[in-house]
């Protein structure tokens, strides 16, 4: 399914589970099976799982596409060629609906630049994959009061070649680096301030109408317990989940909280 028919309205919540470098193919299949038993499909919540690259093909056959969509954790920006060890967005087309781009671990562990991120956003769009552009500041940048500038630069870098028509196909995920996997949760007020800055920048670049159509997620040590607080924020359209997505019960609870937040019960 192409992204041209899969742009979500902002009255729906988007929940993405990033499994990172965990679970082999067999265990991924078992985990998906466990999730399928616990997660109820909701028309107002889109649930996406991002397993390892090795597991994508197997899970694409196993998955109930009305219940879950698949995402790639990473891909190369060239469509084909002599790039040993890489997998292109072209090769993932038809298997995944989403692709993570600019995740903090790609930026800080693998030293991917804004130029790399920009090229991947473009590769995803031309292959009918919705890019999930991750942006966020480190602890040092936060302490120096540079959060707004960092978000500005990462957004500008990642979206440089994106047209107004393409922008609603892009998902933005605010993931403060200092909160990822640390248990040091960002306060709802911190998230609101950062997301307000993101939306202000999008408005400046693309205008009010187009900017208002963009989904913005929060990610950073989100648990089943803290999810409701973030989902209650008017500026947040969903969550990017790491560790909690590896626990079927916790992930199912987060999805249920997302459903209740749309209904106004959270």
Image: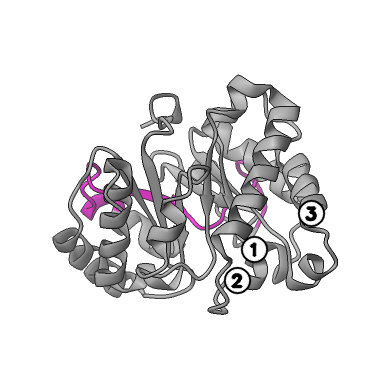
Q: Is residue 155 left or right of residue 213?
A: right
Residue 75 falls inside the magenta stretch: yes
- Circle 2 SS class: helix
Q: Is residue 233 left or right of residue 153?
A: left
Marks 3 and 1 sit apart, C-alpha to C-alpha, by 11 Å
Considering depth in this image, is 130 or 52 the residue closer to the camera? 130
How crowded is the residue under tag 1: few (<14 C-alpha within 10 Å), some, or many (20+)? many
**Farthest residue in the left direction?**
37
- Circle 3 SS class: helix
Residue bearing mark 3: 150
Q: Position of residue 192 (x, y in %)?
A: 59, 51
Residue bearing mark 2: 179
Determine whether label 2 and label 3 are within 8 Å by CB.
Answer: no
* N-terminal-most mark, 2 or 3: 3
Residue 45 quadrant: top left
* Residue 51, visible in the rendered structure: no
* N-terminal-most mark, 3 or 1: 3
**Farthest residue in the bottom direction?**
182
Looking at the picture, does residue 180 appear above or below residue 46?
Answer: below
Residue 27 quadrant: bottom left
Marks 2 and 3 sit apart, C-alpha to C-alpha, by 16 Å
Q: Position of residue 230 (x, y in %)?
A: 46, 56
Q: Residue 176 has which mark?
A: 1
Looking at the picture, does residue 93 appear above or below residue 162?
Answer: below
Determine whether label 2 and label 1 are within 8 Å by CB.
Answer: yes
Q: Looking at the rendering, in which quadrant would you find the N terminus?
A: top left
Q: Is residue 144 left or right of residue 55?
A: right
């Amino acid at each position: 399914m192409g992204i041209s028919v899969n742009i979500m309205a902002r009255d729906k919540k988007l929940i993405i589970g990033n499994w990172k470098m965990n679970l082999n193919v067999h265990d991924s299949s078992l985990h998906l099976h466990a999730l399928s038993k616990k997660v109820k499909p909701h028309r107002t919540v889109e649930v996406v799982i991002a397993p390892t690259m090795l597991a994508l093909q197997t899970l694409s056959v196993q998955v109930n596409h009305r219940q879950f969509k698949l995402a790639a954790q990473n891909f190369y920006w060239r469509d084909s060629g002599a790039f040993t060890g890489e997998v292109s967005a072209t090769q993932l087309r038809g298997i995944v609906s989403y692709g993570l781009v600019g995740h903090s671990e790609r930026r800080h562990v693998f030293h991917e630049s804004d130029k790399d991120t920009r090229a991947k956003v473009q590769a995803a769009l031309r292959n009918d994959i919705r890019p999930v552009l991750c942006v966020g500041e480190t602890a040092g940048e936060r302490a120096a009061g540079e959060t707004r500038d960092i978000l500005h630069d990462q957004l500008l870098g990642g979206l440089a070649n994106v047209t107004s028509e393409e922008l609603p196909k892009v998902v933005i995920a605010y993931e403060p680096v200092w909160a990822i996997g640390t248990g040091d949760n960002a306060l709802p007020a911190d998230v609101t301030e950062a997301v307000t800055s993101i939306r202000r920048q999008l408005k400046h670049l693309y205008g009010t109408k187009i900017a208002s159509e963009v989904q913005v997620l929060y990610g950073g040590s989100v648990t089943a317990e803290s999810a409701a607080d973030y989902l209650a924020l008017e500026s947040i359209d969903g969550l990017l989940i790491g560790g909690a997505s590896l626990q079927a019960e916790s992930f199912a609870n987060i999805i249920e909280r997302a459903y209740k937040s749309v209904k106004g019960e959270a």
